[in-house]
Amino acid sequence: MDFSFTRNIWTFFLVAVLFSLVQPSPANLTTIRDTAIEMIHVGLIIDSHSWVGKNVDSCISMAISEFYGRNSHYRTKLVVHARDSEGDPLLVLSHALVLLESVKLHAIIVAENSAGLKILAELGSRVEIPIISLFAAGPVLSFSEYPCLIQIGADEVSRAEGIATIVEAFGWRSVALIYEDNDSARQILPNVITSLDETGVRLAQHIALSASLTDEEIIQQLKMLMHLGTSVYVVHTSPILASRLFSNAKRLEMMSQGYAWITTDMITNFMNSMDPSVMESMQGVVGFKPHIPASKELRNFAIRWRIRNLNEDQNLQEMELNVYGIWTYDMVQVLATAAECVMARHPDIMRQENKLNINFTTIRSSQSGSVLIEEILQSRFKGVSRGFQLTSGRLIPKEFEIVNVFKGERIMGYWNPENGITSITKEENHTKTNSTSCNKLESVIWPGGTMNIPKGWNLHGKKLRIGVPVNPGFSELISVIRDPQTNKITVDGFCAEVFREAIKSLDYEVQFEFLPYANASGQLAGTYDDLIQEVYHKNYDAVVGDVTIMARRFPYVDFTLPYTDLDIGVAVPKINNNAWIFLRPLSCDLWIATAAFFIFTGIVVWFIERPINNEFQGSPWEQIGMIFWYSFSTLVFAHKENLLSNLSKFVVIIWVLVVLIITSSYTATLASMLTVQQIRLSSREDYIGYQSLVPGTIISNIKIENPRRMQFPSPEAYADALRKGSKNGGVSAIIDEIPYLKLFLAKYPSDYTVIKSKATSGGFGFVFPKGSPLVQDMSSAIVRLREEEKLQMLENKWLNNDESIFINQDSRSNPSRLNLHSFGGLFLVTGLSSTSALLLCLYQKRRAMTICNFKFYLSCTIGSVNTLLPKFRDILGHLTKTFK
């Protein structure tokens, strides 16, 4: 008993000694605390069922493990508190609030959340801890407004600009957008619309697909796209929905030749992780994804990631590493490094017990969080991505890869907002900014295994419904004939034949049928504007006929290039000849002045030549005859007398030049007067006629003052109205487009002529719906027909194309009589030259003669002049009476 008691005492004593040895002293307590590892608590909220969530989770775990394996001496360590959002934005916010209240959080990482990102950013600003958003779609939030928000991933603006660039590079004019109906993917729509508008590309349709749709419902949506016309589709969905979409598209043969599919990085980043059967259905797809430069670090990281997931996570065995995992890996290392730096500089702040009491009225901020944010923003980290640096709280890709899926994934080129499309070799990438040329890309293998660029649209065997106006008055342009027995409709005429030739020249088949735009009685069912509205409301696929291209019609339809003349003409009767029409080109004062200068020039030449030239001597009547003969013979350049004096030769040279100008002007004016009747359409008593289908704006282009208009439906009505004239219930002129007037003159070539006005119209063009790709192809076909002169042959066949019957003259400037004022300069020149020669001659004679001889000579000359003057008076009097 005593022995047992003694043993117990010794046992108690030994335990007490051992306990005192292991108990730390107060002096050593601070040292132990300094060497303890401070846990940095990080909240992680992801959708564990999404591919992005799985990738992010695995890369965060790997980053923490490898980072602290290399830095085991660090005094901080990230501790991740993961929560599953199940794709619900409300759960994201709920998990964030619970974590803030239950754990001393230093940061929150959230992936793929766009709907609640703004609320989380506001919450982060209140509590002053970093909110790290990974790959959230939607608008970029301002860093100045939300200084605690760090955003990683491509923004919607860059995605939309990249899509618009690739569409423009391949020359497509319209596309359809398919996006997932959720908050993340829906944000791309307004940016795509804006980017496409800037490049002139039309968004033909946009369809939102829900992830809950059945395959049958997806097929119905795809069938609707097939009948849309465009065959270029942009897809912006999750990889899971994209897999189902492309599988069903292949079932509908929409992954065949003629189609083009473009995917955003939401899909392209996971292409290598998709099922082989899905990849088989995506052959020919073109996609975008952020570019990560190849490096030894990246290759080693990919190998480690693959080995780790094969051994530990069965859910990731079929997935490949992508940019989401790379950026997540680098972001975690930046966060861990920043936490260690803060711990080294501000240990007291990091050890503060900051367990927050969260409610919507009082939210206490974390002092350590604000310091941690500053450290993260100042980080310069190369990392696996070879350039991890935040700018204003954002990390966005500087460059995108343009990849093509065909038996794997291959890079065709690169794109960035500054330089546009650049080549794989990076040669000449900075020689031209904003390049949109597909020539810098490697050859693309499109759906169906073809290298031919898809046209961007497909009729899918659809027969086009072509509306045809009924215009019996000008059947040579367009005619509609219905067989009363078979009820078969035959459409013919110049417009219809041009359309057939243009369709025939296309390198693909287009089926069409002509449908007359007529009422029950066979007449035109409305105006031409009503017919165009039928195309706008999709009752017709096109219109072929004498439809004028006008600016006010473009908001509703598109036109091809014109295939007719653009001129407007004025048809008028040819003038009736009269006996005295040859006097009309010159006014009375010009006739008198011309005759006077003829005589004056003859007198000057006679005065200079008479003393020295025998041909100018003789009896008074002979000398008068010589004066008239010589001067008027210059009119037809028939003078044959030899001139001896240089002064007289000088006078004649000047006068012959004046005569040449006057005769040429006279001939041109007389020719015009013999062809065109002088029309004064500005008179209130004159009427002008036009076709009832001609738009009023065309008539207004002529700018006739106070026109009184009358409508006529056919060439026969034109001729009848012109024969009557304005005073007898007809018109003085017909204003119309040149094709109509060509037909009119073809029937009445001898009675009427046409003046081409300076005003123009748009010409005739084929009408198609807005954004129709046929517009460009048909315009090219019209140009080819014109270059090959086939269009000219068709005009010669159906229209009178003799250009000699047209006069290029404005209808407001008809031929007018020439007056003295028009030639005042010419008469002044010849008058001065003749007078100067006469005075010089007198001066020479004065010097050569004695005063006596000069007086005798002068008296003889005056006598001769006095003898001739009465005869000159008689002649001038007779001429004056004639012209008056």
Image (cartoon, rainbow, N blue to C red):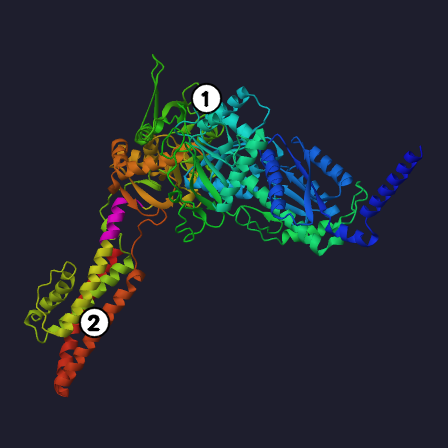
Which residue is under mark 2? 834
Classify residue 771 by image quadrant. top left
Left or right: 380, with 750 as reference point: right
Q: Quick one: quadrant of the C terminus?
A: bottom left
Q: Nearer the viewer, mark 2 or mark 1?
A: 1
- Residue that sits furthest to the right in the current view: 2
Q: CA distance from mark 2 to mark 1?
A: 99 Å
State the extent of the magenta-drawn residues as a range.
Answer: 667-677
Q: Which residue is mark 1?
A: 251
> SS class of the residue under badge 2?
helix
User: With respect to residue 100, does 884 lie above or below?
Assistant: below
Q: Is residue 303 above or below residue 478?
A: below
Position of residue 394 relative to residue 730, above or below, is: below
Q: Is residue 671 magenta?
A: yes
Question: How many numbered marks, from 0 up?
Answer: 2
Q: Is any part of residue 883 visible from this angle?
A: yes
Crowd class of label 1 (few under 14; some 14 to 19; many from 20; radius 10 Å): few
Q: Considering the numbered disc 1 on the image, is that residue within a helix, a strand or a loop?
A: helix
Which of the image's four quarters has the N terminus?
top right
* Residue beneath the point at 56% across and 46% down: 396
Q: Residue at x 16, y 83 (%)?
A: 846
